Image (tube, rainbow, N blue to C red):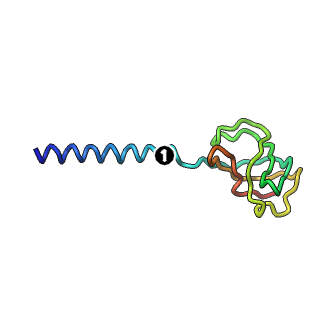
């Protein structure tokens, strides 16, 4: 009976490990690098509007989209600039994590 209980416990732990692994992979942050054009910057709201092509890794079609951004990343970037940026989806929002001309 102890052997059977031990096997049952092992199977339960394996199931827990597998379900935890599945949960972690679903929760991973999606991130991608793309190019686009700056349309608008709102430093006080910590937002930047970028017009870009399709970003498949984030499941975004070509569009103009408002992203959250840390104003410290902006440097001398201004509306009209062509930029290369890295963005991620975080808590149902898109966030620019890197940006350069």
Viewer-side residue, 44 vs 65: 44
Q: Residue at x 77, y 55 (%)?
A: 46
Of 99 and 28, nearer the camera is 28
Report the residue at 80% width, 40% height from top. 64
Q: Image quarter for residue 73?
A: bottom right
Q: Identify the residue at image location x=64%, y=43%.
A: 92
Q: Nearer the viewer, residue 93 or 76?
A: 93
Disc 1 designates what residue? 25
Q: Nearer the viewer, residue 29 or 57?
A: 29
Q: Residue furthest left?
A: 1
Question: Extreme top residue here?
Answer: 61
Give the total number of marks visible in the rendering: 1
| Viewport quadrant of the C terminus | bottom right
The quarter in which the N terminus is drawn is top left
In the displayed orientation, state which residue is furthest to the front: 44
Q: Is residue 26 left or right of residue 89?
A: left
Q: Secondary structure at mark 1?
A: helix
Q: Residues within 10 Å of mark 1 (few under 14, many from 20)?
A: few
Residue 26 is situated, as x and y percent measured from the top left of the image, at 51, 43
Please provide percent x and percent y for residue 56: 65, 39
Q: Position of residue 34 (x, y in %)?
A: 72, 48
Residue 55's spot in the image, x, y percent? 69, 41
Quadrant housing residue 5 = top left
- In the image, is 54 to the left or to the right of 43? left
């Amino acid at each position: 009976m102890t052997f059977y209980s031990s096997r049952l416990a092992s199977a339960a732990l394996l199931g827990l490990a597998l379900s935890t692994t599945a949960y972690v992979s679903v929760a991973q942050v999606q991130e991608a690098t793309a190019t686009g054009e700056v349309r608008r910057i709102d430093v006080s709201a910590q937002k930047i509007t970028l017009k870009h092509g399709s970003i498949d890794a984030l499941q975004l079609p070509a569009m103009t989209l408002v992203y959250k951004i840390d104003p410290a990343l902006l440097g001398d970037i201004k509306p009209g600039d062509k930029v290369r940026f890295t963005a991620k989806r975080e808590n149902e929002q898109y966030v620019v994590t890197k940006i350069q001309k």
